[in-house]
Structure formats: structure tokens, C-alpha cells
Amino acid sequence: MNKKVKTLMILAAVFAGGLAASLTAYNSLSSRVTALNDPNVFAHAETVSMPGAEITENKAEQQARDFTMLDHKGNTVKLSDHYGKPIVLNFWASWCPPCRSEMPAFEKLYEEKGDIVNIMMVNLTDGYKEDTGSAMSYAEKNGYGFPLYFDTRGEGASRYGIVSIPATVFIYADGTVMETHMGSMSENVLYSYSDALLSDQRQRDR
């Protein structure tokens, strides 16, 4: 084998190795991109980060932080307006895959227990990635009937230090926080929290 042929064979082997590595990297990247657009691949604890948000500690047994928001009719309401019944307060956005993955569970909870628990789905309506129209359109398209609220001024996100979504705060009827859960939840996990909220609420009412 002459030197020229040997050199060509070495170059071909190097090229083939580089091509294989490139294909592997491409397939890996493609898988990650696909995952970002498929809500079914998210683990229940995963979230989407909120740029520029500041962490605020929300401990259990502390008074919930009151804030104002808009309801689906454009009326200004406060969180405290809903005291008197336990509250499940969820922060979400329609562009957030983990948020979308848990929506059916919240809808089921609303249908089954909406008369004894206030289900408050608070959309982070920044006017850029999300507006009231896109949020309501998403809910309507998917047949969700739970009450929608809109944090158009970012007051709720600020008060609760929302650095990633979804985030859910479970609040007693007197406005005291039972627990805060960061990340999406399966139906079983959501019901475990809500059952504990109702059970503890009955004990508090005695």
C-alpha cells in the first residue's frame, strides 16, 4: 500500500468518525428540542424558569400574601376575596409544557370539588408571551371550565416569588398557607394535597 493511498484511508476514517459524532450530537439535540414541545415527557417535578424573578420564601402556616388580579370578565379581585373556603392557587402560562401537563387534573378537581374548594388558576399574563386572549383561547380550546384569573401586573408572581412555573399554593379558608408545591403534579399528587387541605380544614373548624 503506497503512502498516498494510506493517507487517503486515514482521512476517510477521520471523516467517518467525525460524521458519526455529528449525527449523535444532532440526534441528541433533536430529542431535547422534541421534548421541550411534548408535555408528556416532563416529569411531575419539572418547571419552566421565569427570567428575572426573585425568590421569596413562602413557609407553611404563614398568612397568604394578598394581591390583586383580573377575573375573566376584566374585574379586579383580590385573593382575600376568596377566603372563607380553602383555596388551591395555581400559577401557570399556556406556553409552559409542565403547566399544560397538569391542567386535566385541575379541571377534574374543579368539577368534583369546586363547590367546597376555590380553584384559582392564575395566568401569568405579561402581555408579551401571554395575554388574556391567548390564555382564554387555550382554556376554551381544551374544554377547561375552571375559573381563570390574570396576573397582568405581575403582583401575584412578585408576592409569591415565582421563579418557575407551574407553582401551586394550598391555602386554608382563613388565609393561612398549608403548603406550596413547585412543579407540575400528577392527579394523585394534586388530590393528596387537596385531601389534606380539606381534612386539616375540618380539624381547624372544630
Image: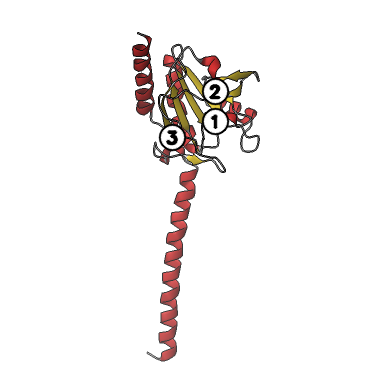
Whole-percent x, y for residue 156 in the image: 56, 29
Whether label 3 touches label 2, CB < 8 Å: no
Residue pictured at 46% horizontal, 45% vertical: 35
Residue 139 lies in what quarter of the image? top right
| For discs 1 and 3, the disc positioned in front in the rendered view | 1
Q: Is residue 87 above or below residue 165?
A: above
Q: Which mark is residue 159?
A: 1
Please report whichever mark, 3 or 2, sits nearer to the chain's N-terminal start.
Answer: 2
Please report whichever mark, 1 or 3, sits nearer to the chain's N-terminal start.
Answer: 1
Q: Which residue is mark 3?
A: 182
**Secondary element at image label 1:** helix
**Badge 1 density bin: few <14, some 14–19, many ≥20, Cα 10 Å:** some
190 sits left or right of 159 in the view:
left
Q: Quadrant of the N terminus?
A: bottom left
Whether label 1 touches label 2, CB < 8 Å: yes
Whether label 1 touches label 3, CB < 8 Å: no
Whole-percent x, y for residue 87 in the image: 46, 19
Whole-percent x, y for residue 63 in the image: 47, 23
Q: Residue furthest top?
A: 206
Please report whichever mark, 1 or 2, sits nearer to the chain's N-terminal start.
Answer: 2
**Secondary element at image label 3:** strand
Q: Residue furthest front?
A: 62
Q: Which residue is mark 2?
A: 66
Residue pictured at 49% horizontal, 40% vertical: 48
| For discs 3 and 2, the disc positioned in front in the rendered view | 2
Which residue type does callout 3 highlight? Met
Name the one closer to the observer, 26 or 194.
Answer: 194
Name the one closer to the observer, 137 or 9.
Answer: 137
